[in-house]
Amino acid sequence: MILTKKELRFYIAADRLMAGKTERIRFKERLRNLLNPDHILNYLKAMRKVAYYKNTKKKGSLNYYYYQRAYTRLGIRLGFSIDPNSFGYGLLIPHYGTIVINSDTKAGNYCVLHTSTCIGGSGKVIGHGLYLASGAQIMGAELTLGENISIGSNSMVNKSFEASNVLLTGSPATIKKKTSAWYDRDGEVYAQRVKAVETLLHKYSGPS
């Protein structure tokens, strides 16, 4: 949960690094964004800002209303409905497309949400490294998933799986096989991004 401005800066930077961007936006990127803005990163930034203002009880500020409006408008444009406090840092959304996440979802860091994915129902507790392939769903109430759970395309999870490092497939889903974290499995570039975020976390965790 984002409670300080330092944490807010870190979350925004972590999301950028996982998307293959620099920690902070640079001049050339600002110029490119004038013609071709990165709506997904803009949405994530607005989402993190809304979380900060909600969590610190600053919902009456002008900044809150500004970012809430941006978050809502971009969400409609992209097809995203994600509660601001549902995910830890390093959230990766590769493409535009419908994504619906129930407000009672609590997931960890380094999660990936592909298109046409949904986490519905109340009481979801999900570990770090969730990977939702296109069309994957997590439904039902009071459900727990372990660390580094990957859910295959068009699969539907409707019960708890407390094991870690597994691939779930089918509808209803069952464990297909053991697997590694998605960022170790899907190419060195993602492992390097996670390493960069963890290095940044060490920096932000130090003295102000």
Image: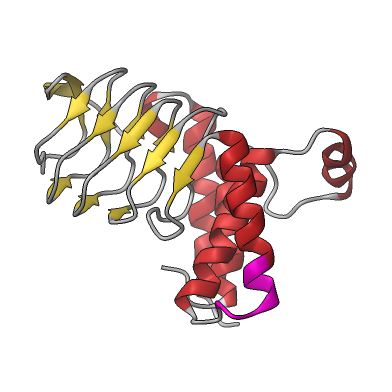
Q: How many marks?
A: 0
Task: Give the left or right position of residue 28, taking residue 25 as reference.
Answer: right
Q: Position of residue 167 (x, y in %)?
A: 21, 25
| Residue at the image point whose x is 49% and y is 46% from the top | 195
Query: With respect to residue 55, does 19 lie above or below?
Result: above
Task: Give the left or right position of residue 84, taking residue 136 as reference.
Answer: right
| Residue at the image point whose x is 59% and y is 35% from the top | 78
Q: Position of residue 202 (x, y in %)?
A: 50, 65
Indicate whether residue 61 is drawn in magenta. Answer: yes
22 or 89, nearer to the observer: 89
Query: With respect to residue 18, does 171 lie above or below?
Result: above
| Residue at the image point whose x is 70% and y is 47% from the top | 22
Task: Give the left or right position of residue 189, taking residue 77 as reference.
Answer: left
Asked whether residue 45 appears in the rendered view, the answer is no
Indicate whether residue 50 is drawn in magenta. Answer: no
Q: Position of residue 107 (x, y in %)?
A: 31, 51
205 or 21, nearer to the observer: 21
Query: With respect to residue 78, does 197 lie above or below?
Result: below
Q: Quadrant of residue 12?
A: bottom right
Q: How is the image coloured?
A: secondary structure
Task: Give the left or right position of residue 172, taking residue 99 as reference.
Answer: left
Q: Position of residue 38 (x, y in %)?
A: 71, 38
Residue range in magenta is 59-65
Quarter occupied by the C terminus: bottom right
204 or 87, nearer to the observer: 87
Quarter occupied by the N terminus: bottom left
Asked whether residue 196 appears in the rendered view, the answer is yes
68 or 1, nearer to the observer: 68
